[in-house]
Image (cartoon, rainbow, N blue to C red):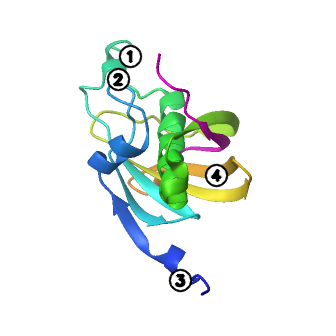
Amino acid sequence: MQADPQENQVRTTVDIARIIDMIPHRYPFLMVDKLIDMVRGESAIGIKNVTINEPFFQGHFPNRPVMPGVLIVEAMAQTAAVLVVETLGVRAEGKIVYFMIVENARFRKPVIPGDQLRLHVAKERHRGNVWKFRGVAKVDEVVVAEATFAAMIMDEEPQP
């Protein structure tokens, strides 16, 4: 029996409870609240609701809070990690996705408390256990950051 090529085209949503089951990140470093419009093996949109309660705003910057650009890239990477785990399904059990490379990162506009980041990630290629993505972060349909990045899925090391 052949796989249905339309199966991956089904758009799905991943809520925070499933995200927590899929990736190891936790507060204060969990940077994605949910995924929408996910097409397994292809693309997804992560949602990050940015609030003044984020711990990084205490020092970046106290009188003019701006989300650090590296954390926007991290949010894109976490969105991609959920996409990889969802795509692999049971093959991802006992595995962890590690960030490997960031290229061509550009930060176009500050992200501030009250913004909702929409983290568009799309697979550029996948070979073996390495996945490469293009990410674009938007607020109100305006591009605020973009980057290409790669990640590797590996066996999770047992806890001592």
Left or right, 122 with respect to 19, comes to right
Q: CA distance from mark 2 to mark 1?
A: 5 Å
Foreground mark, 2 or 4, reads 4
The reply to whether residue 107 is visible in this rendering is yes
Q: Residue 37: where, in percent of width, then height? A: 42, 66
Percent x, y for residue 138? 46, 50
- The residue that disc 1 covers is 61
| For marks 2 and 4 on the same chain, the one whose residue lies earlier in the sequence | 2
Tell me the distance, in whole angstroms, between the alpha carbons under discs 4 and 3. 23 Å
Instruction: Please name the residue that numbered disc 4 is placed on.
Output: 134
Give the residues in magenta.
Answer: 143-160
Quick one: label 4 or label 1, which is nearer the N terminus?
A: 1
Inter-mark Cα distance, 4 to 1: 28 Å
Instruction: Please tell me which of labels 2 and 3 falls first in the chain.
Output: 3
The dot on residue 65 is 2
Reading the image, the residue beneath label 3 is 6
Residues at badges 2 and 1 in contact (C-beta under 8 Å)?
A: yes
User: Would you say 134 lies left or right of 43 here?
Assistant: right
Q: Which mark is residue 53?
A: none
